[in-house]
Amino acid sequence: MSQQQKQSMFISIDGIDGVGKSTQIQRLTEYLEGRGREVMTVRDPGSSEVGGKLRKLLLESDLVMHRRTEAMLFMASRCEMVEASIRPELDRGLTVISDRFLLANVVYQSIGGEVAAEELWQLGLLANGNLRPDFTILFDMPAASAMQRIKGPTDRMESRGVEYMEAVRQQFLTQLPHSSDSVAVVNADQSADAVTEEMLARVAEFLSNA
Ligand code: TMP
């Protein structure tokens, strides 16, 4: 592996529920591995023992809690994931792809106005020791189409309905520039192959400037 390829890189992927992140993350992983990179993927919330327990609490339960409480639990989960998994692998020169990161926290927990987006950026950076992605990809599509793609029972966030999810979509577009120095919006409202093509073009562009 060349010196260039050994350089660590941290990519986060986000978007409203139902945009098809999982398939694209798998394809992105294959693409980067094909370019000689060692890739680790993580999922926020999750990817640690603590994170797994918090994910269950946050998504599968019907617990009622204040938005700030909810925000802090997502942050606690991310703190553990950053310290236990992401930072050690970045230190080893790996490429880490995170399925969601702090951007999602700011976006989902600021809808409704109980907690300000700026406050969540500050708290979130504090919680993850100032780690920011090098590159953030946002998959974008109308909430009505995305929600039609969701199969099976809805989780706590999805059950908030299409109006909430459209507000989430707009907030993603507003907050995206704060996530990383390099960001890309990919149109997710097309075939999976077309989405991949657009995503990889943006990734290639990013890599050529990195
Ligand atoms: P997913 O991992 O299956 O995409 O779902 C995670 C859900 O949790 C999704 O609805 C977004 C939401 N979420 C937050 O509300 N705040 C957060 O900080 C994160 C990471 C996710």
Image: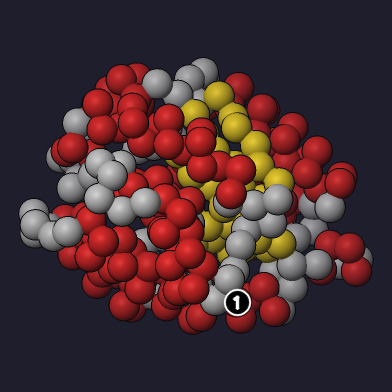
- Return the x and y of residue 29 as percentages of the image width and height: 62, 51
| Relative to 46, residue 175 above or below | above
**Secondary structure under badge 1?**
helix
- Return the x and y of residue 170 as percentages of the image width and height: 43, 30
Residue position for label 1: 87
Is residue 88 visible in the rendered structure shown here?
yes
| Relative to 65, residue 31 above or below | above
The N terminus is located in which quarter? bottom right
- Return the x and y of residue 206 as percentages of the image width and height: 78, 44
Residue in view at x 28 percent, y 23 percent: 148
The amino acid type found where label 1 is placed reads Arg
Residue in view at x 42 percent, y 77 percent: 80
Q: In which quarter of the image is residue 77?
A: bottom left
- Return the x and y of residue 132 as percentages of the image width and height: 61, 62
Instruction: Categorize mark 1 by other alpha carbons within 10 Å: few (<14), some (14-19), many (20+).
Output: some
Viewer-proximal residue among 130 and 16: 130
Residue in view at x 69 percent, y 69 percent: 94
Viewer-proximal residue among 90 and 114: 114
